[in-house]
Amino acid sequence: MEYMTEPVKHTPGHILCCECGVPISPNPANICVACLRSKVDISQGIPKQVSVSFCKQCQRYFQPPGTWVQCALESRELLALCLKKIKAPLSKVRLVDASFVWTEPHSKRLKVKLTIQKEVMNGAILQQVFVVDYVVQPQMCGDCHRVEAKDFWKAVVQVRQKTLHKKTFYYLEQLILKYGMHQNTLRIKDIHDGLDFYYSSKQHAQKMVEFLQCTVPTRYKASQRLISQDVHSNTYNYKSTFSVEIVPICKDNVVCLSPKLAQSLGNMNQICVCIRVTSVIHLIDPNTLQVADIDGNTFWSHPFNSLCHPKQLEEFIVMECSIVRDLKRNAGAGMISKKVSSILLTSP
């Protein structure tokens, strides 16, 4: 006769804690979690209160050794900045999790909840959760301090255009806002015939000059002025100035080209109309509809002025018109526009 035996399920046994006598599962230390936490504090050495510098003027936080960064509340950037303040003590333990604890935005407090682990007695791993309180202290950054001391800018870009109207500057304003070129400026000053852009570094000013060269036909001159020097450490403090001049031609201007320039553009007529200004000057011959593009280098090599600007134009009412069919007969060797139609005004 055979007997059917059921498999025996082995369950782990329990032992008594050597400190309080509570039944626990076996562990390398043979101590319950409560007694182990009372005997060992793995967060010892980690500061529970840290100060963080904050500039009220530019809304930036100080990141050692000498950087100011802009961070939103409870953002990843601000959390990384807070953890860097206690980087050395955290290197002795294992960081498992870190998150913000909500505080009132005007309380000048940032609370970060940390979860850490560390190997303690006989290889037992203990996990602990605690909160670090960051006190936000006001401190003015170097850039804002120079602004208050009236010695804030290191470079200035002077943009000028010698015209009676501001069409080009309205066009530049939209492009500057579109591509965010105003973010690094300290101040924008409106003066006669142009604008002044002030920057805290020469690199930002050079970036602005390159942007203007790619946007409108310009030429510029650079100069610098010595402010102070230290002969012992061989350091010099300069203020740079970039003088940028925009071509004095705008949309709807009537211009007169030089004979040599008109010949180089495909033997077009000297009297032309500027239809628009982008990185180049777009001209059209109103008689033959021949179009040509002039870049900045060509303009400064063969400069020309406008004969009439839009404020001098008068409005007329067209009573009758007839379409000119044979445009190519009197045109030069350049391209002819197919978007603009030519009309002949006749008396009513």
Image (cartoon, rainbow, N blue to C red):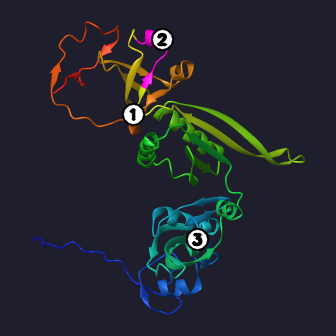
Tell me where the magenta segment starts and ends, as one range. 255-265
The quadrant of the rendering that contains the N terminus is bottom left
Does label 1 or label 3 sit earlier along the sequence?
3
Q: Amino acid at mark 3?
A: Lys
Answer left or right for 67 relative to 233. Answer: left
Q: Which residue is mark 1?
A: 251
Q: Is residue 309 visible?
A: yes
- Outermost residue toward the left in this view: 1
Does label 1 or label 2 sit earlier along the sequence?
1
Q: Secondary structure at mark 3?
A: loop
> Do labels 2 and 3 touch, CB within 8 Å?
no
The quadrant of the rendering that contains the C terminus is top left
Answer left or right for 323 relative to 23. Answer: left
Q: Which residue is mark 3?
A: 56
Please determine whether, in this image, residue 47 is positioned above or below residue 193.
below
Residue 258 located within the stretch drawn in magenta: yes
Cα–Cα span, label 2 and label 3? 61 Å
Give the x, y percent position of residue 8: 24, 74
Give the x, y percent position of residue 268: 38, 12
Query: Residue 302's quadrant in the figure?
Result: top right
Please determine whether, in this image, residue 159 is positioned above or below residue 340.
below
Q: Residues within 10 Å of mark 1 (few under 14, many from 20)?
A: some
Which residue sits at x=52%, y=79%? 131
Q: Amino acid at mark 1?
A: Lys
Residue 143 located within the stretch drawn in magenta: no
Give the x, y percent position of residue 137: 62, 76
Q: Nearer the viewer, residue 44 or 59?
A: 59
Q: Which mark is residue 259?
A: 2
Q: Residues within 10 Å of mark 2 (few under 14, many from 20)?
A: few
Cα–Cα span, label 1 and label 2? 22 Å
Give the x, y percent position of residue 50: 62, 76
Q: Secondary structure at mark 1?
A: loop
